[in-house]
Image (cartoon, coloured by chain):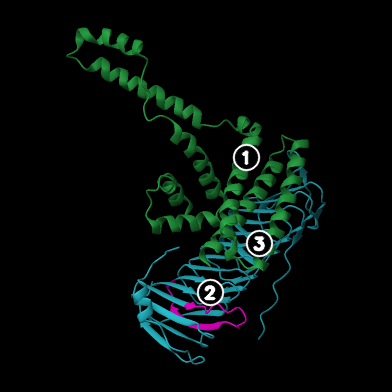
Chain colours: A green, B cyan
Amino acid sequence: MNCDEVRDRIDAALAGRLAPSELTKLEAHIAGCAECRTDFGAARALAAPVARLPRAIEPPPAVWAGIEARIRPARRRAFPAVAAALLLMAASSAATVLIMRQDPAEAAAALPAFESDYIEQAAALSRVLGEERGALAPETIETLERNLRIIDQAIAESRAALEADPGDPDLRLLLRASHEQKVALLEQAARLAREL
Amino acid sequence: MPKFRFPLALLCLAAAGPLSAQAPVRRMAVAPDVSIRILNLAGSIRVTGWDHDSIIVAGTPPERGGMLLMGGSERGVKVVVEASGATDIPGTHLDIRVPRGAHLWVKGATATIAVEGVTGEVEASTVTGAISVRGTPDVLVAESMEGDLDIAAPARVTRLKTAGGAITVRDAANEITATSVSGVIRLLHARAVSSGRLESVSGSVVFNGAVGPGGGLDLQTHDAPIDILLPPGQNATVEVTAYGGRTVNAIPGLVGAPGKGKVVRYRLGNGRARVVARSLKGDVSLRRQMPRPNPSP
């Protein structure tokens, strides 16, 4: 499965609509592809708040009363209602596009959010790993912990450097890479614990 | 990674008796592009592609109470050494012949894995066992926590990952990603890499080879050196960002120009390929590629 195929299937995977074989391929690709892992993490982070949104929003009664009053004289003609619906859809789509399109300058200023996604992912994986830790040999756990310490040190140092120079894009990349390494390592260990 | 699940009964029916050393103990006719899943936690797994539409499994007998299970269909085969649970045994050594076009999924824990001559997809993983791959697989994915990866298999797509194991790749080409936490990453005699990402937190990174026309290569460490060796004819723009370490340019006549922030930009030839190297605390060096040693007669 290549990157394009993975991106096409991320929504289906998060919604639980993907066949097990497809899901396995997607997981395998994500485990080895930082870009797709980032996309997947972003989609997953978005999925929870989106899922909490109401499926439909009832307009206030006054709004419907106003629309009803205007369309009543021409009730046989559906055009105004259709037009209103289309207008609402267009407005909704435009709002969605505006929300989804992140301005690069805003992204640069959103460091805590960008880090918190990774921290959240790492914490979730650590919880999973904690439950299945018994499946791993003591030497493997030692290796895991040693490498996690290396990554945590790198994260701390990259974060300090970025705090000193918040506008440096390469420092952001270095910090992001360390977080990705941590998530990837925890994923690898969790997978081992599950499969062995 | 295909996961095919065979009924337990089928596997039990296919359970093999003790293996005699190197003798063919199991043969099965399969499709040329069969999916094969191999699991042997301890010992070794050697898989060789051959020009026959069949699988042969040979090797040493599973130790005390262990069992070799093999089953499936012509489209999917599973070979599993079921361990006895004892930890003081040397493990089982499997020697397996598969059709060249097979799609392999090979897993070990302390077992070493060696794959040769397979042109389909290869996925191999271990905990501490070393992995070596030779040949021209279509897609290669290999990962280990502590085992070293030794790859001489220019695949269309290559993904390699370790926590502490070293990664060595010879004759890399096309698209390659190699990441490690504390392991060294070495790409030697790389040719025409179209897209590459080599990234280690505390292990050094060495790229010795060529980036294809219009290709991109990204090298990154946190506190370890990055060594870039490019051939004389390489056309590339090289961007180096070394925060705490030094930037060492040992290419005669090449002068760097300051870029944005701490970036130093170099231009080789028409600059069509793009090489980016960044490290927070490690040195970054830029050198001419050393000539490849002549193969032994």
Q: SS class of the residue under badge 3?
A: loop
The residue that mark 3 highlights is: B163
Q: Is residue B224 magenta?
A: no
Which quarter of the figure has residue B187? bottom right
Q: Chain of mark 3?
A: B
The amino acid on which the numbered mark 2 sits, given as a three-letter code, is Gly
Tell me what residue is drawn at x 53 percent, y 86 percent: B64
Q: Earlier in the sequence, mark 2 or mark 3?
A: 2
Q: In this rendering, is residue A137 above or below B50?
A: above
Q: Is residue A150 left or right of residue B173?
A: right
> How far apart in space, not on screen, are marks 2 and 3 (Cα)?
25 Å
Which quarter of the figure has residue B8? bottom left
The answer to whether tags 2 and 3 share a subunit is yes
The residue that mark 2 highlights is: B135
Q: On the rendered image, what quadrant is the N terminus of chain B found in?
A: bottom left
Counting from the top left corner in percent of width and height, residue B222 is at: 74, 52
The amino acid on which the numbered mark 3 sits, given as a three-letter code, is Ala
Q: Chain of mark 1?
A: A
Segment colored magenta:
B81-103
Q: SS class of the residue under badge 1?
A: helix
Counting from the top left corner in percent of width and height, residue B138 is at: 48, 66
- Pointer 1 and pointer 2: residues touching (CB < 8 Å)? no
Q: Which mark is residue B222?
A: none
Tell me what residue is drawn at x 50 percent, y 77 percent: B117
| Viewer-side label of 1, 3 | 1
The residue that mark 1 highlights is: A116
Q: Is residue A135 left or right of residue A87?
A: right
Counting from the top left corner in percent of width and height, residue A95 is at: 45, 25
| Viewer-side label of 1, 2 | 1
Which quarter of the figure has residue A107? top right
- Pointer 2 and pointer 3: residues touching (CB < 8 Å)? no
